Each structure stands twice: as structure tokens, then as C-alpha cells.
Image (cartoon, helix red, strand yellow):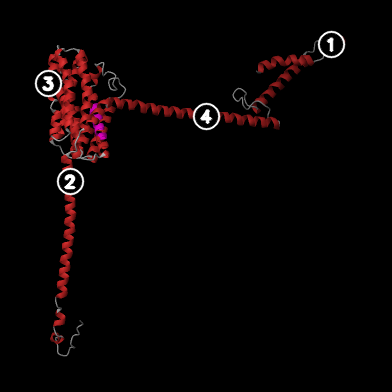
């Protein structure tokens, strides 16, 4: 900047210097000193003015908003103030926009985290399988109820069962991370894919399991809570490791699936009876052909995962099919038992027999021709059988006579205790009245004795005779 000013200043100064005439040219030619002095003086004054101006005004490069006008005049000062206010307003708007963007990003991160962990918890809980467990528990609660079903108790029982089932399914996946990673059907689950840590999943399972058991103990009874806790232990710590040891795991898993209806019955009636075993028996026998068909269809996948299934030692599928058929035959008389034991009406016996006969025909076709097609047909038939069987039970159910009898006994005891209290109070009142009448009829001793007889009580003869008031 200074160098360019020094280059342009001499040009302006030489234009303003007058050129001397001819008779002065010879005499003035050897005197160049005044022009050079004027050039240097002008350059020095320009540089001094430029330095003063740089001190008084802001740098236009670093302060563009406040270096547009001079400082000396009032009008330019007001314009500078307005430009400064406008710049401050722009800065404030930019800061507010940045804050809004930051808040939106923070909110978006929270919503993304909630969505991520919600999806992980949903998959860890095996929500559809847990919903089936809750449905069987709710059906058991309705069957164990009397004439009136307690809706609040039913909801609490279903919620507790859901939490315990979610805990059991999560623990199952925590223990089988390596096995699930080897199977195409399970390698995308949250734990094998690394979307959530095993410690986090274990904490989730523990918290929901404890909460579900506590809810059942609080809103239902200790028997229902005990059945829930025992089923969790049986599924997570017995059935899960047994899957890698022996094919008997299928039958142990069938026991696990048969306990939720007992849990619901116990929550409704506070006890278990013989007719409470109809739905658990149906679930136990139903699970065998259901899982046998699944094990036959997924033999290679289960083999890659390291699970010991019954179908591994049966390459032809004949033994697997016969096991399925045998358990279907076991389910045929369950409808008649439900009617004879007073659980349902007689129509359910006919409907249940027809449903079981259809599933048996599917198992028979699997026996005659063991193939993926017949196994898949039996599998889908089992999926239709269970909801139809439970719907028939609930539609044709009769009130639990034991529950009604217990309620009647409690009512009779309450009424009897209340009546006894009333009679006892009446007896007490009659006794008090008789005692009062006896006291009224009995003469007073103070009035029967003459006052003179009491004069002898004075220790000395000169004391006055006592005065008695009646």
C-alpha cells in the first residue's frame, strides 16, 4: 500500500510544477534539489496522513461493517451506528439459527437412540412368540375365572407374563450368541450383528424379569409368580443349554410352553385343579408336531448352529413323522375331557375332535410321504390349530365351579361372621339388661340397717354420732 502510494505521488506533483521559460532553463537546470525535496515532503505527508487514518478507522478487511464511512461527521456516524446494529442483528439471527440446528440435532439423536434400542428390545424379546405366550396365559386366566372375569387382574397377569417371557427370550439369545451367528435364520439378530452388547441385553433381561415376577406377586398371587419364575429358569438355564446336548430338549421346551396357561389359571383362582390341565396338555402335545416339522425343514441350519435335534438322526424323516402323528393322536380325547370335567359345553367336544382330526390327517400325510412339502403343510396346520382350539375353549367355557364355590364359601363365612357378631351383641345387651333389672330389684343395705347400729363405731363415747345420707 505505501509502496504504490509513493509511486503515484511524484506523478501528481510533477504535473503541478511550472516549467521555466527559455532564459531561465539554463540557470535552473543545475538546481534539481527543490523538486526532489518537494517530492519527498509530499510522500512523507501522505504516509503520515495514511498512518493517522489507519489509527482512527477500523481495518476494512477485518471490520467491513463498521469501516464504510468517515468518523468526523455526524451523518456518517449515525449511518455507521445503524450498520453496526444491522450487523449485530444478523449475528444474533445466525446464532439463533445455529442454536435451533443444535437443538434439532440433539433431539434427532435422542429419537434415533430410542428407535434403535426399541427395535433391539423388540427383537430380543421375540415379541411375536411372547405374544403367543401371553395369549395362552390370558386364556388360562379366563378359564379359571368364575361368572365374572376381572379385567384389571387379566391385564396385570398378561403384562407380567409378557415381561417374564421377554426376559427368558433375551437370556436365551445372550447364551446363544455364537450359535446364532452361524445360522442364516438368526445371524441378523441384535447380539450376533453387534447392534447391542451382551451386558446391555443381560441387564434388560434381568430388569424386566424381576419386574414381571414382582407384578404377578403383587397383583395376582404367590403361586402365579412362582410358576413364572420357575418357567423362566427352566427355559433359560435348562432348555437353552440342553439344545446343544441332547434331542430331549424338544420335550423340555414343550413343558415350558405348557406352563403359561397354568400361570393364568392360578392367577384367577389361586389354586390348580384337574380341569386346569386341559389347555396345558393341548399345548404340550401340540408343540411336538409343530417343532418336529420345523426341525425337519431347518435341519441344515440347526446343524450349522450346533443344535442337537431329533431330526439329525433321521435322514429319511420317518421317525420324525411318527412322533408327530403319535402326539396328534394324544390330543384327540382332550375335547371330551373338557366336557366331562365341566370346563366347557358339549359342543366343544365335537369341535375339538374335528380340529384335532384335521391336524392328524396332516401328520399322517407326513408319515406316508416325508418331504419338505408335507412337513410344511403340517407346520402351517399346527399354526391354525392352536388359536382355533383356544377360541373354542373360551367360546364354550363354563364358569369355574371351584372358583364359584370358593366365592360362595367366602361370602357365607362373611355373612355368618356378621350374623354371629350381631347375635353376640344382642346377647350381651340382654345380659346387661337382666343384670340391671337384678340390681334394681335387690334392696340396699344402707336403708335396711338402722342408723343407731352405726353409733358403736365411734372409738370414744364423747365423739358425735356419724351422719348417714341416703
Q: Which residue is mark 4?
A: 95
* Contact? badges 1 and 2 (CB < 8 Å): no
* Mark 2 or 3, nearer chain start: 3
Does 6 appear in magenta? no
- Dot 1 or dot 2, earlier in sequence: 1
Closest to the camera, between mark 4 and mark 3, is: 3
Q: Which mark is residue 269?
A: none
Nearest to the observer: residue 173 or residue 343: 343
* Residue 58 spot, x, y in % from top left: 63, 26
Mark 3 element type: helix
Q: CA distance from mark 2 to mark 3?
A: 43 Å
**Count of numbered tags:** 4
Up-down relation of residue 376 to residue 211 (above or below): above
Residue that extends furthest to the bottom in the rendered view of this protein:
462
Q: Secondary structure at mark 4?
A: helix
Q: Which residue is mark 3?
A: 326
Give the number of the disc on residue 27: 1
Crowdedness of circle 4 by 10 Å Cα count: few (<14), some, many (20+)?
few
Residue identified by numbered label 2:
408
Q: Earlier in the sequence, mark 4 or mark 3?
A: 4
Can residue 219 be seen here?
A: yes
Q: Quadrant of the C terminus?
A: bottom left
The magenta region covers: 158-169
Amino acid at each position: 500500500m505505501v509502496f504504490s502510494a509513493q509511486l503515484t505521488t511524484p506523478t501528481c506533483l510533477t504535473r503541478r510544477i511550472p516549467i521555466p521559460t527559455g532564459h531561465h532553463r539554463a540557470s535552473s537546470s543545475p538546481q534539481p534539489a527543490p523538486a526532489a525535496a518537494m517530492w519527498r515532503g509530499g510522500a512523507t505527508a501522505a504516509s503520515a496522513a495514511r498512518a493517522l487514518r489507519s489509527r482512527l478507522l477500523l481495518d476494512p478487511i477485518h471490520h467491513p461493517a463498521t469501516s464504510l464511512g468517515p468518523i468526523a461527521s455526524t451523518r456518517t456516524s449515525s449511518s455507521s451506528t445503524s450498520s453496526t446494529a444491522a450487523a449485530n442483528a444478523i449475528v444474533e439471527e445466525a446464532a439463533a439459527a445455529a442454536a435451533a440446528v443444535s437443538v434439532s440435532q440433539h433431539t434427532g439423536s435422542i429419537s434415533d437412540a430410542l428407535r434403535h434400542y426399541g427395535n433391539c428390545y423388540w427383537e430380543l424379546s421375540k415379541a411375536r412368540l411372547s405374544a403367543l405366550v401371553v395369549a395362552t396365559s390370558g386364556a388360562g386366566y379366563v378359564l379359571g375365572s368364575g361368572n365374572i372375569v376381572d379385567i384389571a387382574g387379566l391385564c396385570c397377569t398378561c403384562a407380567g407374563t409378557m415381561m417374564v417371557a421377554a426376559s427368558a427370550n433375551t437370556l436365551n439369545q445372550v447364551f446363544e450368541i455364537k450359535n446364532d451367528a452361524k445360522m442364516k435364520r438368526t445371524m441378523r439378530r441384535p447380539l450376533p450383528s453387534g447392534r447391542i452388547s451382551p451386558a446391555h441385553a443381560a441387564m434388560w433381561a434381568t430388569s424386566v424379569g424381576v419386574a414381571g415376577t414382582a407384578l404377578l406377586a403383587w397383583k395376582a398371587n404367590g403361586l402365579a409368580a412362582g410358576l413364572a419364575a420357575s418357567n423362566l429358569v427352566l427355559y433359560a438355564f435348562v432348555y437353552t443349554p440342553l439344545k446343544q446336548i441332547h434331542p430331549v430338549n424338544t420335550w423340555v421346551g414343550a413343558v415350558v410352553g405348557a406352563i403359561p396357561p397354568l400361570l393364568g389359571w392360578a392367577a384367577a383362582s389361586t389354586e390348580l385343579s384337574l380341569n386346569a390341565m386341559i389347555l396345558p396338555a393341548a399345548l404340550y402335545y401340540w408343540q411336538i408336531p409343530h417343532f418336529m416339522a420345523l426341525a425337519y425343514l431347518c435341519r441344515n441350519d440347526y446343524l450349522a448352529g450346533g443344535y442337537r435335534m431329533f431330526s439329525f438322526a433321521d435322514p429319511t424323516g420317518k421317525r420324525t413323522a411318527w412322533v408327530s402323528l403319535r402326539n396328534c393322536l394324544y390330543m384327540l380325547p382332550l375335547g371330551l375331557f373338557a366336557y366331562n370335567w365341566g370346563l366347557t359345553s358339549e359342543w366343544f367336544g365335537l369341535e375339538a375332535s374335528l380340529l384335532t382330526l384335521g391336524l392328524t390327517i396332516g401328520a399322517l400325510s407326513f408319515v406316508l410321504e416325508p418331504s419338505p412339502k408335507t412337513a410344511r403343510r403340517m407346520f402351517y396346520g399346527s399354526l391354525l390349530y392352536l388359536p382355533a382350539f383356544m377360541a373354542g375353549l373360551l367360546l364354550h367355557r363354563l364358569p369355574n365351579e371351584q372358583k364359584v364355590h370358593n366365592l360362595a364359601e367366602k361370602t357365607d363365612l362373611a355373612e355368618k361372621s356378621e350374623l354371629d357378631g350381631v347375635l353376640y351383641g344382642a346377647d350381651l345387651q340382654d345380659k346387661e339388661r337382666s343384670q340391671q333389672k337384678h340390681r334394681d330389684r335387690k334392696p340396699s343395705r344402707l336403708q335396711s340397717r338402722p342408723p343407731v347400729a352405726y353409733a358403736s363405731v365411734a372409738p370414744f363415747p364423747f365423739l358425735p354420732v356419724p351422719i348417714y345420707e341416703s
